[in-house]
Image: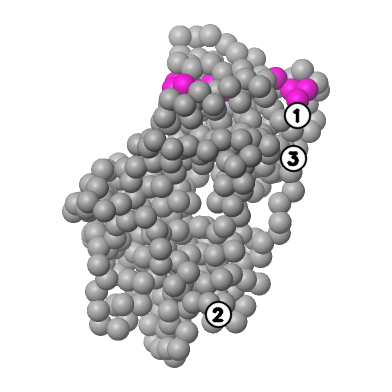
């Protein structure tokens, strides 16, 4: 029996599980186990909606997997023994594997800046988003909400909060100007939308400390806040490093050109937890890249079970989709290396596009179950610009 364990049921892990089950459904010698801390699927693309007080669909993983043959194990991964080929669940149960897919993702980095862990909210998971929603619901009119981090997560969160809570003052603080990774026109549209929503933006601001009643900037300036949302930086679980897998300076598993650990080839690493290198650099963790890594890994494992080897993984970015509340959005289409291209969408068409992107994963998982793994086989490979280089 080929025992395949997938750790994590995010976008990458779910894509792997559903696609691999479809690819091996006629085999009796394959057993797939998916491990995740909760039964409900977390739509990370929509966490800013939860944080603003909106209700999302209740997407249950075991219900989706019914009839696929995948065993679902609810629990926290507490240890990986790469030598013994085992994983420990909740410090109570040990599972053995022949092939491991490590897709544990990332969480908000609350350790780099003092006070973040104690005094700031994050969008790490649904529970943290609900906690922020509860806090926002208790604030008095005129209260100030500081969003730390001017990346796209911070922008989406600030816009959503400002739209859903127009009686609050939302201040977006970050080192860079919001939308700096986009083209000039897309960035100008984004900034105008934030202004229309009443979001105050302050670029060139580095938060040095989060306090019970606000934040302290580098240089000592204090900014009062009734709530702080931290969206700057991510970190990964230390489990991979503790298991002896080769990791990079951020703790991500270093992979070869087929997404296997360079030190333990029976371990595939995908999504945010992996340092996957293309010619333009290491890909950054998003749903856009995570699902292709999962689809590729399923195909690679299926090929390996047949005694074949998959072609090297190739991935090129397509877009930077940004929601600006429920009624506006901007989509910057990109080159494969994620630099801005010529085209963009704004307004209603962008809202439709962004909603399609955000809702697509769960639908894709269902179609894979019904129609087969071919539903996950297509993504932008990037041509010459994504020729992989060895790590």
The residue at the point 75 percent across, 29 percent down is 165
Asked if the residue under mark 1 is in contact with the one under mark 3, i.e. CB atoms within 8 Å, the reply is: yes
Q: Secondary structure at mark 1?
A: loop
Q: Is 167 colored magenta in this rendering?
A: yes
Q: What residue is pinned by disc 3?
A: 53
Q: What residue is pinned by disc 2?
A: 68
- 211 with respect to 379 (left or right): right
Q: Secondary structure at mark 2?
A: loop
**Distance between mark 2 and mark 1 Cα atoms:** 43 Å
Closer to us: 7 or 24:
24
The residue at the point 30 percent across, 70 percent down is 266
Earlier in the chain: of badge 3 and badge 1, it is 3
Asked if the residue under mark 3 is in contact with the one under mark 2, i.e. CB atoms within 8 Å, the reply is: no
Closer to us: 141 or 156:
156
The residue at the point 56 percent across, 31 percent down is 155
Closer to us: 29 or 359:
359
Q: Secondary structure at mark 3?
A: loop
Q: Position of residue 143 (x, y in %)?
A: 74, 20
Residue segment shown in magenta: 165-178
């Amino acid at each position: 029996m080929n025992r395949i364990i997938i750790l994590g049921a995010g976008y990458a892990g779910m894509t792997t599980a559903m696609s691999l089950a479809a690819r091996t459904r006629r085999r009796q010698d394959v057993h797939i186990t998916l491990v995740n801390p909760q039964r409900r699927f977390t739509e990370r693309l929509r966490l800013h909606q939860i944080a603003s007080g909106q209700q999302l669909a209740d997407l249950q993983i075991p219900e989706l997997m019914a009839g696929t043959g995948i065993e679902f194990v609810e629990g926290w991964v507490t240890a990986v023994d790469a030598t013994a080929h085992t994983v420990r669940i909740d410090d109570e149960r040990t599972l053995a594997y022949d092939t491991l897919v490590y897709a544990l993702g990332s969480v908000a980095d609350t350790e780099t800046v003092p006070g973040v862990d104690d005094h700031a909210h994050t969008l790490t998971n649904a529970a943290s988003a609900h906690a922020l929603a509860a806090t926002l619901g208790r604030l008095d009119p005129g209260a100030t909400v500081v969003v730390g981090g001017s990346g796209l997560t911070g922008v989406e969160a600030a816009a959503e909060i400002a739209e859903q809570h127009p009686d609050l003052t939302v201040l977006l603080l970050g080192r860079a100007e919001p939308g700096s990774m986009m083209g000039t026109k897309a960035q100008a549209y984004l900034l105008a939308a934030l202004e229309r929503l009443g979001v105050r933006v302050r670029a060139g601001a580095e938060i040095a400390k989060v306090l019970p009643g606000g934040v302290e900037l580098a240089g000592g300036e204090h900014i009062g806040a009734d709530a702080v949302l931290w969206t700057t930086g991510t970190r990964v679980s230390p489990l991979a490093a503790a298991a002896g897998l080769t990791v990079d300076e951020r703790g991500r598993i270093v992979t070869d050109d087929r997404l296997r650990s360079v030190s333990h080839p029976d371990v595939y690493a995908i999504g945010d937890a992996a340092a996957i290198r293309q010619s333009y650099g290491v890909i950054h963790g998003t749903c856009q890249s995570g699902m292709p890594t999962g689809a590729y890994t399923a195909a690679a494992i299926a090929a390996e079970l047949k005694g074949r080897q998959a072609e090297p993984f190739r991935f090129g970015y397509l877009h930077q989709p940004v929601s600006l509340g429920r009624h506006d959005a901007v989509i910057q289409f990109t080159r494969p290396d994620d630099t801005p291209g010529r085209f963009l969408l704004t307004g209603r068409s962008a809202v439709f596009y962004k909603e399609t992107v955000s809702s697509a994963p769960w639908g894709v998982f269902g179609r894979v179950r019904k129609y087969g793994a071919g539903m996950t086989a297509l993504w932008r490979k990037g041509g010459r610009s994504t020729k992989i280089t060895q790590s």
